[in-house]
């Protein structure tokens, strides 16, 4: 079975799996479902949700289950149980970071007051700087699924909406390092990226 990642024609919850697949150079079909085709497909999926990932081993929904499967499959999930646990903690922290950001997108935000958003960004950047602890990557000496998960939040939400806070942080050099990984860089500058 060819490897297939099915999602809408946006980055959303499929972007971290895409970044991982691109990083490892996997051949895959990035199947983009139109919103018109979605109702019929929805009925066939376990949770009625996208993304959905299929390869020779699995057919699974849930973006973070996909990320963890890809991490195990492509050796991006740490070298031992301690590293895997640290990666899980960072991934869950990224989820909390995203929730904190989205809670601040309210009427004040839309009226131009981004102080709550920038406050959340500053707090979470500091948290991730401590976890990075001056290293090139969050866990070990190469990129892991934790790096791609945090990178997605930073690159797609923080960089465009809170650039000053990011540029003043140590996390910006890490973001640039991940963005410059050869296959990731090629993907980020390609027309394949939604």
Image (cartoon, rainbow, N blue to C red):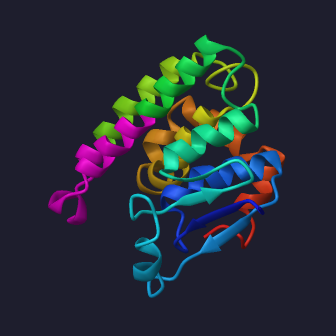
Residue 133 falls inside the magenta stretch: no
Position of residue 108 relative to residue 123, above or below, is below
Foreground residue, 47 or 182? 47
- Residue 140 lies in quadrant: top right
How far across and how far down the image is residue 24, in percent?
80, 45
Q: In the picture provided, is 13 more to the left or to the right than 145?
A: left
How far across and how far down the image is residue 191, in percent?
72, 73
How far across and how far down the image is residue 136, in percent?
70, 25
Q: In the picture provided, is 68 more to the left or to the right than 2?
A: left
- The quadrant of the picture occupied by the C terminus is bottom right
Seen as rendered, the residue at the extreme left is 107
> What residue lies at 75% left-to-right and 27% top-to-bottom?
142
- The quadrant of the picture occupied by the N terminus is bottom right
Seen as rendered, the residue at the extreme bottom is 36
Numbered range of the magenta stretch: 94-117
> What residue lies at 83% left-to-right and 51% top-to-bottom?
25
Position of residue 15 relative to residue 79, above or below, is below
């Amino acid at each position: 079975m060819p490897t297939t990642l099915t999602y809408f024609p946006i980055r959303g919850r499929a972007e971290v799996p895409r970044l991982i697949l691109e990083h490892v150079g996997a051949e895959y079909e990035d199947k983009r479902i139109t919103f018109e085709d979605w109702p019929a497909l929805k009925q066939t999926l376990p949770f009625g949700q996208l993304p959905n990932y299929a390869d020779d081993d699995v057919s699974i929904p849930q973006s973070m289950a996909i990320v963890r499967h890809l991490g195990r499959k492509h050796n991006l999930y740490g070298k031992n149980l301690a590293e895997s646990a640290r990666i899980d903690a960072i991934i869950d922290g990224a989820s909390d970071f995203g929730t904190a950001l989205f809670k601040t997108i309210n009427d004040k935000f839309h009226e131009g007051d981004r102080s709550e958003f920038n406050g959340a960004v500053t707090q979470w950047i500091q948290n991730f700087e401590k976890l990075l602890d001056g290293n090139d990557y969050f866990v070990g000496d190469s990129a892991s699924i934790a790096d791609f998960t945090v990178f997605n939040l930073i690159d797609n939400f923080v960089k465009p909406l809170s650039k000053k806070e990011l540029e003043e942080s140590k996390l910006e050099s890490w973001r640039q390092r991940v963005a410059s990984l050869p296959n990731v860089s090629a993907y980020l500058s390609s027309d394949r990226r939604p």
